[in-house]
Amino acid sequence: MAQHPKQVYSQKSTPSERLALRIARYTGNMSFVWWHAFVFLFWILLNLIAEKNAWDPYPFNLLTMVVSLEAIFLSTFVLIAENRESKRNEIREELDYEVNVKAEQEIREIKSMMREVKAKLDLLDQKKKR
């Protein structure tokens, strides 16, 4: 019996791949966007209000660095998730191929049996005509 592609792939994936997928899944939704919008707005407003005591005064170089580092890591997680999805698709294609080969063999067997049945029916039909 053929296994489900998810079962096959979950057996082959590493914990770090599963973590990267979870992160990519979370960062790909609107709650992540809203959370970041709130944090960035809060960061900017606090630094503008604090003026001379600001830990990251305008033009917010620290914020820029943090966002750049985050973008590097998030893009890496997205690439890992895409590679994982590509591997999963390859496994699915292999399993589909196996199923197709088995189905083709069974169809050949059924066709062979049908030919035998037809031949026997033809013989019976010929005997009845005699």
Image: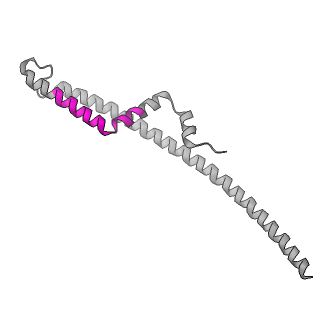
Q: Residue at x 9, y 17 (%)?
A: 53
Q: Is residue 107 above or below residue 7?
A: below
Image quarter (top left, top right, bottom left or bottom right) of the C terminus: bottom right
* Residue 96 % position (x, y): 59, 50
Question: From the viewer's perspective, is 83 left or right of 44?
Answer: right
Task: Tell me if residue 72 is in the magenta stretch.
Answer: no
Q: Residue 25: x, y in percent?
A: 39, 37
The extreme bottom residue here reads 130
What's the coloring here? one colour
Query: What residue lies at 54% left-to-right and 38% top-to-bottom?
Result: 9
Which residues are drawn in magenta? Answer: 22-43
Residue 105 location, quadrant:
bottom right
- The residue drawn where x is 21% and y is 31% is 38
User: Is 109 situated above or below 43?
Assistant: below
Could you tell me which quadrant the N terminus lies in?
Answer: top right
Q: Quadrant of residue 31?
A: top left
Dominant secondary structure of the residues highlighted in magenta in the image: helix
Q: Is residue 41 magenta?
A: yes
Q: Is residue 18 left or right of residue 113?
A: left
Residue 81, above or below 116: above
How many numbered marks appear? 0
Residue furthest toward the top? Answer: 53
Identify which residue is drawn at 6% across, 19% down. 52
Residue sitting nearer the eye, 34 or 107: 34
Q: Is residue 111 left or right of residue 83?
A: right
